[in-house]
Image (cartoon, helix red, strand yellow):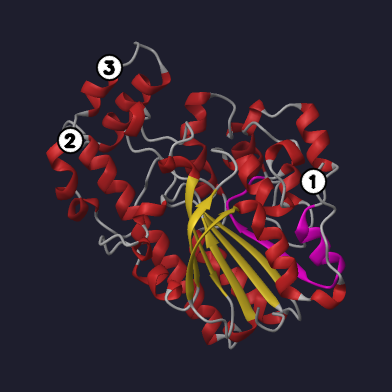
Amino acid sequence: MTDNVKNVVVVVIDALRWDRVGVYEMENNLTPRIDSLAKESTVFEKAFTTINATDPAITSIHTGCHPKGHGVHNHGSYITQEEKQAVNATTQFPKLLQKNGFYTGNYGRVLGRWHKSGFDRYPETEDTKTRLSEWLYGTSEYLGSVASTIYNAFSPTESNAVDALVSDLSRADQFYGFLHLLDTHIPYEPDSNSPRQYREQYEADEVSLTELAERYPEGSWTSEQCLEWNEQYSDNADLTTADMNARYDATVRDADAKVGQLVDRIETAGELEDTMIVLLSDHGESMTEHGIIYDHHGLYDQTVRIPLIVWLPEETASRTDELVQITDIAPTVLDAVDSSANLQSDGCS
C-alpha cells in the first residue's frame, strides 16, 4: 500500500459491461482513456456487484455491506419503508470521512434519499425539476426506462460535473468525490460518437426490434419498450439489435472520454499524485443475452460481473484474479486515506 492519500475519487459508470473495457483483453478500442489509466493501476479481473439494481448497489459501495446488511433489496419506488429505516441506521463511509475533515461531494446522477448522507455537496433536490426526476425514478416499469433521461436533463451535465468535482478537489485539504455517469444506461444516448461505426460486428446476428416485440406478450414491458425504441430512434427504418448494440458502444466511448477529461483535469490541477481513483460500474447490462432485452435483470456474468480499476499514486501496476466485490471498496478507501484517524465502518448486521 502506498502512503496515505488525501483525495479519493470514485467513478461509477452506470450499467457499463466489463467486456466493453479494453483492458479486459477486449480488442474493441472503446475505452482508450480507461485502458491508459489501467496500465498504471490495479486491474481486478474477477470483480462483481452485489445485486443487479442501482439503489442497493450504490448503497453497497458506500456501506461496505451486502443488501441483507444495509437493508436495501429493491430499487426506486419498490423500496419499502422498512428498507429505508434499515439503511438510515447504517453508517456510510462518506459520513466517516466528513467527520474526519474531508470535504465530500456527489456529482452527476441524482439518487437522493439516504444516498445524500455524508455529502457536503449534493445536487439540489428541492427544485421542481429534480423533484420531478426523483418522482419518476422507478415509479413504474415503463417510466423507469426513461428515468435516466430525466436525470440527464435536469441534473448537471457530466461535463459540468467533472468541472465541479475538480474545482472542489483543488480547494479542499482532503476530498472525497463520487462521480456517477449515466452514458451507458438505457436509452443509450450518444453525445459525440456516431453509433454507425460500431454496427458491423453485430450484423450477422441482428434481429429487428419489431420482431423481438412479437416474441413477448402484447402489452408486456419488453414488447412495449422494443416498439418505443424503434419509434424513437429508427428514423422510419426498422431498428435492429445491431443498431442498439452500436448505440451502447458509442456511449461507452462517451463515458471513456469523460474519464479521460477527469484524469487530465486532476493532473493539470497538480493533484493526481495525491489522489486515489476507483473506477467501476454498479452492475452490467444484458444486450439480449438470455432473453433479457437491454436491461440488467438476472444474475448472469453480463449483469453481475463489473470492471474495477484502482489507481493509487506510486503503486505498482498489477492485475489480480482475486475474487472481489463492490463491498470491498469502503474498507479499501478507509484504509488508503488516513489510517492514523482510525476510520472504521460500523460493519454490517
Quadrant in which the N terminus appears: bottom right
**Foreground tag (2 vs 1):** 1
The disc placed on residue 215 is 3
Q: Viewer-nearest of labels 1 and 3?
A: 1
Kindly give the residue lying farthest to the top in the view shown: 218
Q: Nearer the viewer, residue 9 or 103?
A: 9
Q: Secondary structure at mark 2?
A: loop
Q: Position of residue 221 (x, y in %)?
A: 42, 20
Q: Quadrant of residue 226?
A: top left
Q: Amino acid at mark 1?
A: Cys
- Residue 218 sits inside the magenta stretch: no
Magenta residues, as a range? 92-111
Spatial CA distance of label 3 from label 2 is 15 Å
Q: CA distance from mark 1 to mark 3?
A: 43 Å
Quadrant of res 208: top left
Quadrant in the picture for residue 70: top right
